[in-house]
Image: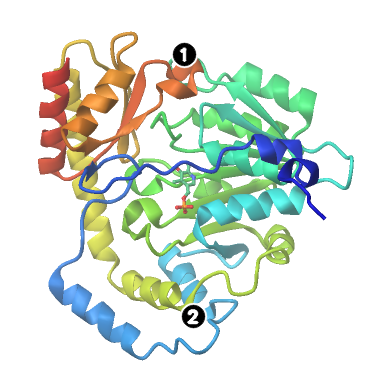
Amino acid sequence: MTVTPAELIRPEILALQAYPVADAQGLIKLDAMENPYSWPDELVTEWLATLRDTPLNRYPDSQARALVQQMRASLELPAEVELLLGNGSDELIQLLALTLAGAQGERRVVLAPEPSFVMYRMVATFTGLDYVGVPLRPDFSLDTAAMLHAIRTHRPALVFIAYPNNPTGNLFDTGALREIIAATPGLVVVDEAYGAFAEASFINALAEDDNLLLMRTLSKSGLAGLRLGYVLGAAHWLREIDKLRLPYNINVLTQRSVEFVLRHRAVLDMQAGWIRQARTELQAGLTQLPGIVTYPSQANFILFRVPEGQAGAVFNGLKYQGVLIKNLHPVGGLLHDCLRVTVGTSAENRRFLDALGGLL
Ligand SMILES: *Cc1c(COP(=O)(O)O)cnc(C)c1O
């Protein structure tokens, strides 16, 4: 038999593009919200020593009990808040969608403001849910009335709110978010991927709203290579989601390494402080450049707008000078002429600002 992909695979999947990751070889990498700092040598040595005795021939603990216990203590979680680990929060977004997907032919909706994190739409599409994006206002604040109207119209099973938002960097209004949580007939996932760099969190709202889940990741705080995200929420929700998790999703090196890092949390906290400081400097540097409009950020990146029609040239010019950032102009909509730069070290940020200044 010969059979083509087009005959066998759903049109929505044929139409998808695999998640694009730029080749950053040899470039200053300011495109993916990574923490630019490594660890002091003594810490690396100590970490390697803990890995020495890790058995690679055995499956990892499928419940990651030691790690979960340590995370609970570290986050000071109250007993009624449950914690579920994912292979990055990307995996958790997928698990949430799979858990809430409708039966054959039943329409289920995932709703999120736009622009926001692209995985919400991608995952909804390939897990067979309908995706509804509700445009933010031109200043990237939530259009509360439009959100509430869309929620009443589409009755979403799942709402994703990135807080701070990616790629815009801002926190949404707390009151607006509370209204959205109250109005949503499904689950609302507040995605705090950038919580380490922000001044606010919805963690205290977990006790009050049964349909609220909080999602976080260690990726942006300095452990992107380990892939560990988590969801916090009521046990009766997380128990159901856990049934769809593949049994050994958190590998043993990640479990042991994160346990180690949690014993040395001060290092990551200190680095987050450096990044927040560097963000202020980067923001100030960008503001001084002619023709640049910047947007306030509570995350470890800054969104900025260049004069009309120049985003592609600016992106390529920076890359030619060895600096990789993210061009968001091709996304269209509110992101026309916008680019996003991750906060790097002071030296990297200066290289970026010098290169950008030369291009304008
Ligand atoms: C980066 C990011 C994630 C994904 O994080 P991983 O844990 O690395 O999969 C989730 N949500 C938002 C808003 C992000 O920007």
The x, y position of residue 160, in whole percent, is: 60, 39
At x 37%, y 61%, the residue is 225
Circles 1 and 2 in contact, beta carbons < 8 Å: no
Q: Quadrant of residue 341?
A: top left
**Which secondary structure, mark 1?**
loop
Task: Give the quadrant of the N terminus.
Answer: bottom right
Q: Is residue 213 left or right of residue 67?
A: right
**Which secondary structure, mark 2?**
helix
The type of residue carrying mark 2 is Ala
- Taking depth in this image into account, of 352 and 300 the one nearest to the observer is 352
The x, y position of residue 340, in whole percent, is: 33, 30
Q: Is mark 2 within 8 Å of ligand 1?
A: no
The type of residue carrying mark 1 is Pro
* Vertical side of 59 occupied by 163: above or below: above
Q: Quadrant of residue 119?
A: top right
Q: Which residue is the site of mark 1? A: 138
Q: Which residue is the site of mark 2? A: 66
Q: Quadrant of residue 316?
A: top left
Separation of marks 1 and 2 at Cα, in angstroms: 46 Å
Residue 240 in view of the camera: yes
Q: How many marks?
A: 2
The x, y position of residue 360, in whole percent, is: 17, 14
The x, y position of residue 93, in whole percent, is: 60, 50
Which of the labelled discs sits on residue 90, or is there none? none
At x 45%, y 86%, the residue is 56
- Taking depth in this image into account, of 63 and 105 the one nearest to the observer is 105
